[in-house]
Amino acid sequence: MTTAKLAKIDHQPATLRDMVQDRMREAIVEGVFQPGERLVERPLCEQLGVSRTVIRETIRYLEAEGLVEILPGHGPIVASMSWDDARQIYDIRRLLETAAAEQCARNIDEDITRKLGAALKRLQKESKGKTRGALFRATSDFYQVVFHGAGHHIAWEVVQRLNGRISRLRMLTLTSADRTRPGISYMEDIFSAVVSGDPAAARLAIQHHLDEATSVAERVFASQDNGQ
């Protein structure tokens, strides 16, 4: 029986499948592949330089995330999203994120404060850049610190399953000029409330952020439905 102790691996190296999933997810989120567009294996294999097996595994994974749907006789296509889909996602986020922010504020300590501060700095940096994928990853990393700081690991697993669709909604709301405040300002409010150890303020900061995002998304979907 071995008694040697091994150092914990904090970040596992990405596998080829992980990299392909990230690449295709970003392409869908950023509109490179449009809703309803067919995802044909051969050109995807050629563009990404991977086997059909990897592409098929990726498509199955993205189907589970709700970004791809399989139509009988037509194969995989990019899934469409309706306002009703978006509304349900915002409702789920409201429940999970407010609970996580409240508990994270109760649990706040030097380690959580340090990690959340570092995540906010990355988010502030990426919010000034032009790479949407990097911004969405930084946003996800920020929320991950909040959920883990709360001890809500299973809730975070649920959020991760929705992350592709959440990112699509972020793309819609970020590119809309119909905003009362920059998105980053809401994240700064969430950070301040959580690190101050005030659960009520943390809940309110999340609610304000999601109220704005929900309102913007509703107007965007209404505009699309009206053909504007």
Image (cartoon, rainbow, N blue to C red):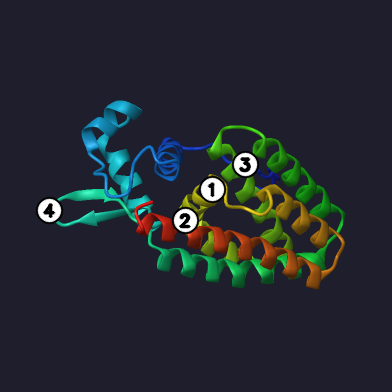
Residue labelled with disc 4? 73
Mark 4–mark 3 Cα distance, whole angstroms, equals: 40 Å
Badge 2 element = helix
**Horizontal placement of 222 versus 69: left or right?**
right
Q: Residues within 10 Å of mark 4 (few under 14, many from 20)?
A: few
Displayed quadrant of residue 197? bottom right
Residue labelled with disc 1? 176
Mark 3–mark 1 Cα distance, whole angstroms, equals: 34 Å
Displayed quadrant of residue 66? bottom left
- Give the amino acid at mark 1: Ser
Mark 1–mark 2 Cα distance, whole angstroms, equals: 8 Å
- Give the amino acid at mark 3: His
Which is more toward the observer, 220 or 160? Answer: 220
Badge 3 element = loop
Q: Earlier in the sequence, mark 1 or mark 2?
A: 1
For the residues carrying marks 3 and 1, which lies nearer the camera in this image? Answer: 1
Q: Is residue 22 above or below residue 36?
A: above
Residue 117 image point, x, y percent: 79, 47
Q: Confirm or deny contact between disc 1 and disc 2 (CB under 8 A).
A: yes
For the residues carrying marks 4 and 1, which lies nearer the camera in this image? Answer: 1
Q: Earlier in the sequence, mark 3 or mark 1?
A: 3
Q: Residues within 10 Å of mark 3 (few under 14, many from 20)?
A: few
Q: Earlier in the sequence, mark 4 or mark 3?
A: 3
Residue labelled with disc 3? 11
- Give the amino acid at mark 2: Val
Q: Residue at x 46, y 63 (%)?
A: 86
Q: Residue at x 40, y 37 (%)?
A: 20
For the residues carrying marks 4 and 2, which lies nearer the camera in this image? Answer: 2
Q: Residue at x 28, y 55 (%)?
A: 69
Residue labelled with disc 2? 220
Residue 206 image point, x, y percent: 69, 64
Badge 4 element = loop
